[in-house]
Amino acid sequence: MPESQTSSFGLDDFSLDDRLRLFSYVNAENRLAYLWVLRAFEAARTSYQVVLHTSEVQDALVRLGQDPAVLELPRLLDALVDWGVLDRSQDGARAATLAEYRNRHSVYQFTEAGYRAHRAVESVLAAGLDDSTLSRLVFADLLADLKALTAANESGDAEEVYRKLNRLDRALADVAERAARFYHMLGDLSRTHDVRPEAFLAHKDALLAHLRDFHDELQRYTPRLREAVLEVEATGLDRMIEAAAEADERLFATPAERLADWRRRWEGLRSWLAPDNDAPSEADRLSGATMAAIGDVLALLRRVTEARRGGVSRESQLRHLAAWFTGAGSDEAAHAIFEVVFGLGGPRHVGVGYADPEAVPSRLSWWEAPAVELSRSLVQSGRMPGQGNGRPARIERSDASRRALRERQVADERRQAEAAAGLVKAGDGPMMLDDAQAGALRRLLDIALAARQANQREVPLAAAAFGVRLTLTPSPGRFSTVHTASGLLHLDGYTLTVSAAEHTTVRREPAAA
């Protein structure tokens, strides 16, 4: 018999069909009952109680809040033994009488393969979004372990080399697995955003911040990790591999197999952090995938926002439209709905020539010739621009509306003149302007500053309107402050003066009859 078949026992004795039968209880009729029985065995195993009698299984189920009588425990145990999840043996030491010894008591325990199958099922049941995250703190641990590995290899500490290599291998495997789950979660999110838009909008900021922080840490540590890998190899790669294989305690692996395994692990670690020939590393690919994920999240955010802008999502609109088509009583009604919704009616045929017919060769087909620009009125109404019934269009006049607008304009000018007059009174002391006076002051400042020319900051600026005159005198190193109801207005480098303007007058309209 070959050595590979006799070098170990336990899990290797299970064929492929036997391993698949371990999960038969997942699809069984009473799958929840089977799950609670196995949880009872696992709870006892955490208390270092491996072998359980039927009565002990019942007690464990009671502690878990289950009723053993309802679960039909003997039948469940027999089925689990048949599938290979549990192993059954006889314990004669439990017999108190000769009759009990002859009957012998059955005890049960997990098979190694059965325990792994149960743990796999439990990991799927307990999986959540917390597992689908990128670990940015692991890069500092990787760098520290690489530095410690360099020191251990230089000193010849085989056990420390084995511990650090084993820890690095597990850490990188965890990073790769987390990244795969995270990006798969993003793919599921982009495919189901119409169903759960609220969940995405509630966590979009945290998601983008998580991606950005992970990418920043990855960019910061990637060159330092590459240098650390090269420093480790400089201390002797073969010696390090041999030291790790020597300290490896796997019983059923030959020395050659352990050497090959640790060399393969180091090559995988090197491909992650420092590949040869300047090839892109797995860390670089992870960085690119992170940037692509940020773009995907932003695109998804834009799609969700646009879909919710109208108050309903696109999916809801299409579902209602499909219900209308389904509820249509006849084909004519369905065609009418289609015409109204999509507007794909009969085309309007128009004929327009090129402005310069000689510029386009007549041998060109419609597919090759440039398009002719059509006016909107021609396409919508079939009439050329300016084409009517031969008479000019009637001008609609509304004297009442014009009179109301004029009265509103006069009243507005009167209010501005009164506010400007208040500026002159406020200029005698500390200025404290209300909203109307501040608006008049800003208008005068706009007029004065608009007249300023480039490179002429030493020339005084002035503006006159509504019977007042505003002067801005250059004052380097000083500023004027105006107190308004909305806050403070600072004019840097100018002194503000407001006075009455004798050459301007405010035109007042006569009162309406």
Image: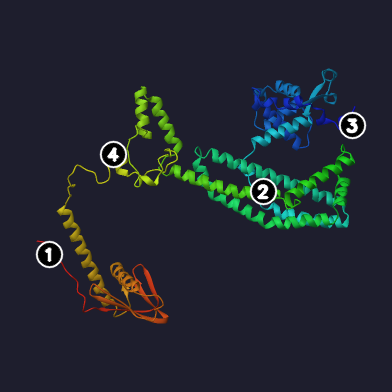
Q: Which residue is mark 3?
A: 3
Q: Looking at the figure, which quarter contains the C terminus? A: bottom left
In three-dimensional space, the C-alpha distance between marks 3 and 1, rounded to whole angstroms, equals 117 Å
View extreme (left): residue: 513
Q: Are marks 2 and 1 in contact (CB under 8 Å)?
A: no
Q: Nearer the viewer, residue 31 or 280?
A: 280
Q: Secondary structure at mark 2?
A: helix
Of the image marks 2 and 3, the number of the one nearer the N terminus: 3
On the question of residue 298 being in view, the answer is yes
Residue drawn at the location 37% of the way across and 23% of the way down: 331
Of the image marks 3 and 1, the number of the one nearer the N terminus: 3
Q: Looking at the figure, which quarter contains the N terminus? A: top right
| Disc 3 residue type (three-letter) | Glu
| Disc 2 residue type (three-letter) | Arg
Of the image marks 4 and 2, the number of the one nearer the N terminus: 2
Q: Which residue is mark 1?
A: 511
| Disc 4 residue type (three-letter) | Gly
Q: Are marks 2 and 3 in contact (CB under 8 Å)?
A: no
> What mark, if any, has residue 382 been given in the picture?
4
Q: Nearer the viewer, mark 2 or mark 3?
A: 2
